[in-house]
Image: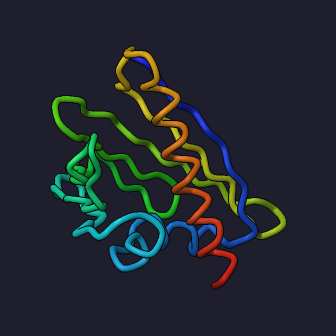
Amino acid sequence: MAELVLDFQFTSSINQVWTALTDSNMLAKWMWKNDFKPVVGYKFTYRAEPNEWWDGIVEGQVLEVEEPHSLSYTWGTGPEVHTVVWTLTALEDGGTQLHLDQTGISEQPGALEGAKYGQMELVGKLEKLLAEA
């Protein structure tokens, strides 16, 4: 299985980034409609626009919550289930370092690139949302 590791920096505070990652209403603004709750064991569903390759449904379960420093959950569509770990670090200038570690990605050609493209697109929307706050 492949692993995706990405790092991002935001000028927003760690608490603002944490809220954007864990609040269902905030998530819907940069990701998809959802019923997410940052509670260990909670099963959630994201609902995106379906397309010809995908029904738009992502199901997951919260694995770990260490507010405001770490959030981990499963993330799956069809038979493939990934583990997503977000790690947040407060920076001296008041900003936030956001580290993504996504494991369990298929070794199929294009799978890792597709996961990277998707996460980069989503985090780009997150960055825009945080800049507006």
In this rendering, is residue 7 above or below 121? above
* Outermost residue to the right: 93
State the residue in front, 67 or 37: 37
* Outermost residue to the front: 52
> In the shown orientation, is residue 86 left or right of residue 52?
right
The residue depicted at 36 percent of the width and 79 percent of the height is 25
Asked whether residue 56 is in view, the answer is yes
Residue 46 drawn at (x, y percent): 26, 60
State the residue in front, 84 or 106: 106
Image quadrant occupied by the N terminus: top left
In this rendering, is residue 122 above or below 102? below
Residue 103 drawn at (x, y percent): 40, 28
* Quadrant in the picture for residue 80: top left
The residue depicted at 59 percent of the width and 45 percent of the height is 99
In this rendering, is residue 73 above or below 95? above
Q: What is the count of numbered marks?
A: 0
Asked whether residue 61 is in view, the answer is no
State the residue in front, 109 or 116: 109
> In the shown orientation, is residue 21 left or right of residue 56?
right
The residue depicted at 62 percent of the width and 52 percent of the height is 98
The residue depicted at 24 percent of the width and 50 percent of the height is 58
Residue 31 drawn at (x, y percent): 42, 64
Image quadrant occupied by the C terminus: bottom right
Residue 26 drawn at (x, y percent): 43, 76
* Outermost residue to the bottom: 133
Q: How is the image coloured?
A: rainbow
